[in-house]
């Protein structure tokens, strides 16, 4: 996962947080899409794309933190 190591944490962290929380009102898209997924109503392509767009940076951040050499001791 060299490509993940190449992404600076200082860049990935704010991107992940901002996209996970955007838009701030009335509710974040990520939360809305996760509720739709749990309800079984996530079927439109735009909703699936939104889930991917707003969730992927957060997934990458978690992967980076879990695989980081700084956390292994």
Image (spheres, grey):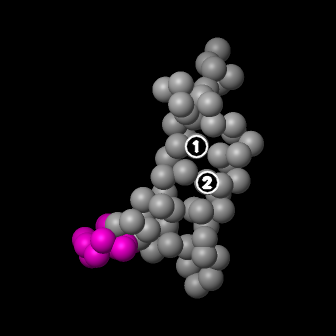
Please identify the dominant SS of the magenta region. helix
Residue 66 in sight in this render: no
How far across and how far down the image is residue 63, in percent? 52, 37
Q: Is residue 56 magenta?
A: no
Q: Provide the secondary structure element on which disc 2 rests.
A: helix
Question: Left or right of 30: which side holds 25?
Answer: right
User: Which residue is depicted at the point 55% across and 33% down?
Assistant: 4
**Numbered disc total:** 2
Mark sitting on residue 25: none
How far across and how far down the image is residue 18, in percent? 66, 62
Residue ID for mark 1? 61
Q: Vertically, is 64 above or below 58?
A: above
When asked about the image quadrant of residue 34, the answer is bottom left
Q: Is residue 46 magenta?
A: yes
Segment tinted magenta in the rendering = 35-47
Sequence-wise, the earlier of marks 2 and 1 is 2
Q: Vertically, is 73 above or below 11?
A: above
User: Which residue is depicted at the point 64% across and 15% down?
Assistant: 73
Question: Left or right of 65: which side holds 37?
Answer: left
Pointers 2 and 1 in contact (CB under 8 A)? yes
User: Which residue is depicted at the point 74% across and 42% down?
Assistant: 10
Residue 51 in sight in this render: yes
């Amino acid at each position: 996962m060299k490509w993940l190591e190449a992404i600076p944490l200082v860049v990935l962290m704010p991107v992940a947080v901002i996209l996970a929380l955007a838009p701030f009102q009335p509710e974040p898209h990520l939360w809305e899409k996760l509720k739709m997924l749990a309800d079984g109503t996530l079927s439109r392509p735009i909703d699936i794309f939104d889930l991917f767009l707003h969730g992927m940076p957060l997934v990458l951040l978690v992967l980076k933190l879990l695989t980081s050499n700084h956390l292994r001791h």
